Image: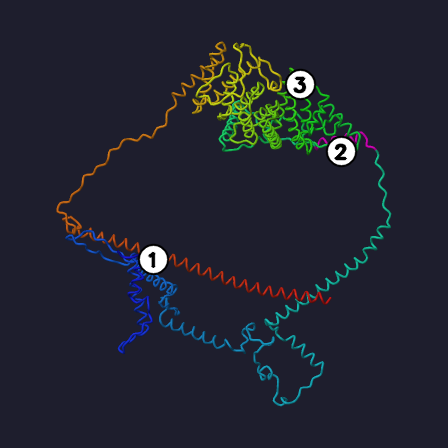
């Protein structure tokens, strides 16, 4: 068996003399060494042959379709890698040629005058061409003529003087001279010379200024105006310095002037003047008249109400599904009469702190007559910011007057009246919530008027919570954290939870906020807290069982719309029923055990007994056990209606069905248990009928497709077509060849397009790299120059500073 690829490669290299000992000296005179270039070519050829031998992917062999006479015939061989490289080289050469010939053409463009004008005959063409040629020669001859004054602006100058040559013997100089007097000096007096100059100035034609003269004038004017501005600036600075020097003297002179005494106090105003000012103030406060809205029909009002209800229901459903976490109702959506029936003047007006006693008395009399709590009134009440402040105000107020006093505080500190009232009412909302919790634990709970008073306070708190939801939410979240700490202490062995105020707290949260939302800042933590208390606490007393029953009822009221399943409620209700059972109940479907055994007596009265939340902190009697059982039965009935549409209703209701069947045997005279058992059995029957077990998806049975084999008589592998029509056969052959050529041409076009795209991208990258490198060099040079200049400036600055 042959060795590995590495061993075969080493053996091939050694066999061809490429490895091993190479410094062996040849013996004999007849041995001649070939030139180095020939040896190098032989070496490259050997290496290439070995490379091709050990790289099977460089050679591709086509497999023969049929074997002839049982002999293996090797198919045609090709080198796709080399072919591909040859194609790349050809495309690159074509690309370079195309790039070199870009924007170049070998055609001659005839620009001779009149060649493309058919209206000219040959003689006219020759004449026009001769004329143009002479003009070109003339322009070319005068191009470097220094004496040509046709273009003064384009003349050559040196040091501001023209280089044009002037002949000393121009005709102008010799125009008035005589041959006799040519060598004689001319003598003229000063007056004659001046008159001659004036005559020359008057008769001389104004000469056009050259560009140099114009620029000199511009520079002279610029220097002149600059000097004028510098002189004006120096004068201004001198004046400022003089004023600065005299500033102290001016202040001293002003201090010596005696101050004028204040004007005498004006006489008291007359009653007519006071009435006039009051009338003007009332006119300023009057609202401008506005067009009234059209009176709507009953159908329109009903439609508006239905649309509003539909919109609110859609928003609630979105919040329940978690699509919208629900912005609370804004202040603009409150009722118009929330702050009471205030006058427009009171809503729009602002208190004026006038100094006139008559105005104050008049405003006080108006406030007393209207019964309003104005800012300047003597009967104004303060807005309590803590619970102690509110209790200090309510010491002199009866329990029945508490809602009226709360309403008075709200009306007095309406945000419409004065800035800052909104913040005060936000804090007062938290105080009112605390006060309701305080009343739930006070001795006033047993009074007959307490339910009505509590209902009124909760209604007011509901409106305030809609007005200040953010502040109340932050406050209640702190209360929830404090309650969580007390639950942990109770689990550890304390008795800090639950209190009556805790149960009232959960109930108020359900009244004030939307409990069907998928997530709510207060409702969700409250649900978690109540579920934790039902699951973690040990309900080993009748008081705790009553508290847990009220918590379960509160949770079910939270889910009256969303109808989410809460397993802690199910386990607690089972635990409570097992705790009150006269005998121990055991069944496989019951997965919980009671924390305490409080068996009921055999007989149950049919009298209506009502449990109150305040019973949690009281000493209870045996009659409260019956009331607790009735309350538990009602809560189970409510839970049954809430969760009867759940797919897992059978598993939820099975333990209750077993326990209540035992209770029906213990207390056959108690009709509510019998009715509840019948309801359970009926709903369980419906649930079992509607439930269908999971099964695989059923598919329609499909038969296996069968195909009859097609046999060709007189089959010949070398024959391409069995068409007997010779012309049609040739046509099909040509069509096939054309199709093959199209495929080959399209393949080559695609290859050329991809190659050109690669070349364009490469050239673009190269140009971008060259540009960036060029800019980097420029920036580096600029930075170097700037750094050198900065260092030179710093050295000069330091040297000047040291000289000082």
Pick the front one: 363 or 495: 495
Mark 1 residue element: helix
Which callout, 1 or 3, points to the residue nearer the camera? 3
State the CA–CA distance, disc 2 to disc 1.
92 Å
Pick the front one: 3 or 211: 3
Is 240 displayed left or right of 707 in the figure? right
Lower sequence index among marks 2 and 3: 2
Residue 28 percent across, percent down from the top left? 27, 77
Q: Which residue is mark 3?
A: 443
Lower sequence index among marks 2 and 1: 2
Q: Which residue is mark 1?
A: 752
Lower sequence index among marks 1 and 3: 3
Residue 260 percent across, percent down from the top left? 85, 44
The answer to whether residue 546 is magenta is no
Crowd rating for badge 3 (residues with CA inside 10 Å; few <14, some 14–19, many 20+)? few
Could you tell me which residue is drawn at 73 percent across and 32 percent down? Answer: 351
Residue 161 percent across, percent down from the top left? 60, 76
Mark 2 residue element: loop
Crowd rating for badge 2 (residues with CA inside 10 Å; few <14, some 14–19, many 20+)? few
Magenta part, dominant SS: helix
Q: CB under 8 Å between callouts 2 and 3?
A: no
Q: Residues in magenta?
A: 268-284
Could you tell me which residue is drawn at 35 percent across and 28 percent down? Answer: 695
Mark 3 residue element: helix
Q: Which residue is mark 2?
A: 353
Pick the front one: 170 or 573: 573
């Amino acid at each position: 068996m042959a060795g590995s690829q590495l061993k075969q490669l080493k053996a091939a290299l050694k066999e061809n003399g490429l490895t091993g000992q190479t410094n062996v000296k040849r013996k004999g005179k007849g041995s001649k060494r070939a030139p180095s270039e020939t040896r190098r070519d032989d070496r490259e050829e050997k290496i290439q042959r070995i490379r091709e031998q050990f790289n099977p992917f460089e050679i591709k062999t086509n497999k023969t379709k049929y074997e002839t006479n049982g002999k293996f015939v090797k198919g045609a061989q090709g080198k796709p890698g080399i072919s591909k490289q040859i194609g790349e080289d050809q495309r690159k050469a074509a690309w370079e040629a195309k790039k070199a010939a870009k924007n170049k053409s070998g055609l001659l463009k005839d620009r001779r005058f009149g060649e493309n004008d058919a209206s000219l005959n040959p003689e006219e063409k020759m004449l026009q061409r001769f004329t143009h040629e002479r003009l070109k020669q003339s322009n070319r001859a005068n191009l470097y003529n220094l004496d040509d004054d046709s273009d003064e602006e384009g003349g050559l100058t040196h040091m501001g003087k023209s280089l044009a040559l002037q002949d000393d013997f121009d005709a102008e100089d010799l125009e008035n001279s005589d041959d006799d007097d040519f060598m004689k000096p001319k003598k003229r007096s000063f007056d004659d010379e001046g008159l001659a100059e004036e005559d020359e100035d008057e008769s001389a034609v104004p000469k056009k200024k050259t560009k140099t003269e114009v620029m000199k004038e511009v520079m002279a004017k610029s220097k002149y105006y600059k000097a004028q501005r510098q002189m004006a600036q120096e004068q201004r600075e001198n004046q400022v310095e003089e004023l600065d020097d005299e500033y102290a003297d001016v202040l001293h002179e002003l201090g010596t002037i005696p101050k004028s005494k204040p004007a005498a106090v004006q006489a008291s105003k007359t009653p007519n003047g006071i009435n006039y000012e009051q009338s003007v103030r009332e006119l300023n406060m009057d609202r401008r008249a506005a067009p009234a809205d059209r009176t709507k029909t009953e159908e329109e009002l009903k439609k508006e109400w239905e649309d509003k209800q539909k919109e609110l229901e859609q928003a609630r459903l979105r919040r329940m599904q978690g699509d919208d976490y629900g912005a609370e109702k804004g202040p603009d959506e409150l009722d118009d009469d929330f702050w009471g029936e205030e006058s427009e003047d009171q809503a729009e007006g602002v208190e004026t702190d006038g100094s006139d006693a008559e105005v104050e008395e008049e405003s006080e009399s108006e406030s007393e007559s209207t019964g309003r709590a104005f800012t300047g009134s003597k009967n104004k009440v303060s807005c309590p910011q803590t619970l102690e402040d509110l209790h200090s105000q309510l010491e002199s107020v009866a329990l029945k007057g508490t809602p009226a006093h709360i309403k008075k505080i709200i009306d007095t500190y309406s945000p419409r009246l004065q800035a800052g009232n909104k913040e005060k009412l936000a804090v007062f909302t938290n105080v009112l919530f605390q006060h309701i919790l305080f009343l739930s634990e006070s001795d006033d709970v047993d009074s007959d008027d307490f339910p009505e008073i509590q209902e009124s306070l909760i209604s007011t708190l509901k409106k305030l919570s809609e007005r200040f939801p953010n502040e109340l939410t932050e406050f209640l979240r702190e209360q929830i954290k404090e309650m969580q700490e007390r639950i942990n202490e109770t689990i550890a062995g304390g008795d800090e939870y639950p209190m009556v105020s805790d149960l009232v707290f959960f109930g108020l949260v359900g009244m004030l906020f939307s409990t069907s939302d998928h997530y709510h800042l207060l409702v969700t933590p409250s649900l978690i807290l109540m579920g934790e208390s039902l699951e973690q606490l040990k309900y080993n007393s009748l008081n705790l069982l009553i508290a847990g029953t009220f918590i379960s009822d509160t949770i079910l009221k939270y889910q009256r719309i969303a109808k989410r399943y809460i397993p802690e409620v199910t386990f607690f209700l089972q635990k409570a029923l097992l705790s009150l059972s006269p005998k121990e109940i055991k069944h496989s479907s019951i997965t919980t055990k009671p924390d305490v055994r409080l068996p009921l007596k055999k007989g149950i009265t049919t009298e209506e007994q009502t449990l109150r939340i305040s019973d949690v902190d009281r000493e209870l009697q045996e009659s409260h056990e019956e009331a607790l059982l009735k309350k538990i039965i009602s809560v189970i009935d409510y839970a049954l209606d809430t969760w009867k549409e759940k797919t897992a209703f059978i598993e939820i209701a099975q333990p209750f069905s077993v326990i209540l069947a035992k209770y029906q045997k213990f207390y056959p005279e108690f009709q509510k248990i019998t009715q509840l058992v019948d309801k359970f059995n009926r709903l369980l029957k419906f649930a079992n009928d509607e439930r269908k077990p999971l099964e695989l998806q059923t598919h329609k049975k499909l038969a296996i497709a069968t195909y009859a084999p097609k046999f060709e008589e007189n089959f010949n592998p070398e024959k391409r077509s069995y068409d007997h029509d010779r012309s049609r056969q040739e046509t099909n052959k040509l069509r096939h060849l054309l199709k093959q050529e199209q495929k080959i041409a399209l393949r080559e076009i695609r290859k050329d397009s991809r190659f050109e795209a690669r070349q364009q991208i490469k050239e673009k990258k190269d140009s971008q790299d060259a540009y960036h490198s060029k800019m980097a060099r420029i920036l580096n040079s600029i930075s170097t120059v700037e750094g050198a200049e900065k260092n030179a400036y710093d050295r000069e600055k330091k040297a000047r500073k040291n000289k000082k």
